[in-house]
Image (cartoon, grey):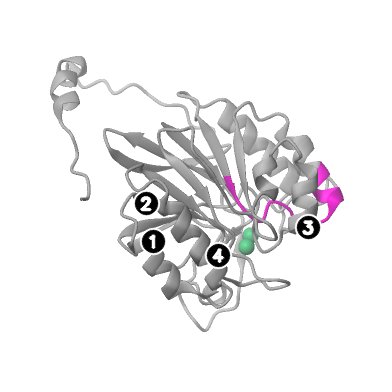
Amino acid sequence: MLIAQISDCHVVADPDGVRYDVNPAAGLSGAITHLNGLSPRPDVVVLTGDLVEHGTAEEYAVLRDRLQALEIPFLLVRGNHDERDPLVDAFPDHPALGSGGRFVQYAVDHHPLRIVVADSTLPARHDGGFDDERAEWLDHTLAERPDHPTVVAWHHPPIDTGIWWMDAGGLNQGRDVMAEVIGRHPQVERVLCGHQHRSIQAAWAETMVSVCPSTAHQVGLDLLPENEPRFIAEPPACQLHFWHAGQLVTHTSLIGWPAQPQVLDSGQAWHEMLPDRRQRRPLRKG
Ligand SMILES: [Fe+2]
Ligand SMILES: [Fe+2]
């Protein structure tokens, strides 16, 4: 199974609108073209929040219009820039979006990897958090299928990345409770997040957190606490989570990068190595 992840599209109502030197709608369309052209084609695309900029119906109409070009089923996650009601209203063909009451939280059970979407947003806040109600929902939901490999997706990464101003606006409530919840469920292969507008990975709560870059503007990689917040015009990218031989491997795929692959010409008969490689099986955590 191949899960593609894109994040932080920040679509605005004006399809020609520009923020931080990037047109978000064009960035999303570029990502869609990239995803549609991947081989093998992903089974599903997970969009990990900040789908639009202001959470308005007009913005979700642009988002929906652009996503119609995506030829792969997709799942939507709520970010701090998203508003629950207009998001749910814009996608009536995604009934799971509205199934979690005032939160956007649901589980998808028809893939080899189960996908559980949680809601890390706080009302009118840039930073995120989980209360007991959402932690209990996730604990209960994960307990339903303890033997099924699972990916959990929510917007705010539960880690400090060293980029001070994004950490200040990170997951500031319920982090320890969520670590206990995730730690109780060893079938969780990955926690997929966005919000940081960079590719970041870290071990956390007996699993791994993987953060996806934005399809629009990226956050500058700056680990110095004295510097001011800044964005940077780095290439957008998606994450490809490849479920293979009992292990989930995450690749970063740059979007719009024009390089063409060149066949390695070393005289090695590569096909003769295939049987040995297929016999190898990576270790799984217990
Ligand atoms: Fe964002
Ligand atoms: Fe965010």
Q: Which residue position is annotated with label 1?
A: 182
Q: Residues within 10 Å of mark 2 (few under 14, many from 20)?
A: many
Q: Which mark is residue 55?
A: 3
Q: Residues within 10 Å of mark 4 (few under 14, many from 20)?
A: some
Real-space CA distance between mark 2 and mark 1, rounded to the nearest whole angstrom = 7 Å
The answer to the question of whether label 4 and label 2 lie on touching residues, with beta carbons closer than 8 A, is no
Q: What residue is at 67 percent from the left and 47 percent from the top?
A: 97
Q: Tell which circle, 3 or 2, labels the residue nearer the N-terminal end.
A: 3
Element assignment for label 1: helix
**Left or right, residue 131 beside residue 187:** right
Q: Which residue position is annotated with label 2?
A: 188
The answer to the question of whether label 3 and label 2 lie on touching residues, with beta carbons closer than 8 A, is no
Indicate if the residue with disc 4 has its beta carbon within 8 Å of ligand 2.
no
**Left or right, residue 256 beside residue 242:** right
Q: Amino acid at mark 3?
A: Gly
Where residue 194 sits, quadrant-wise, is bottom right
Q: Which residues are magenta?
A: 47-61
Element assignment for label 3: loop
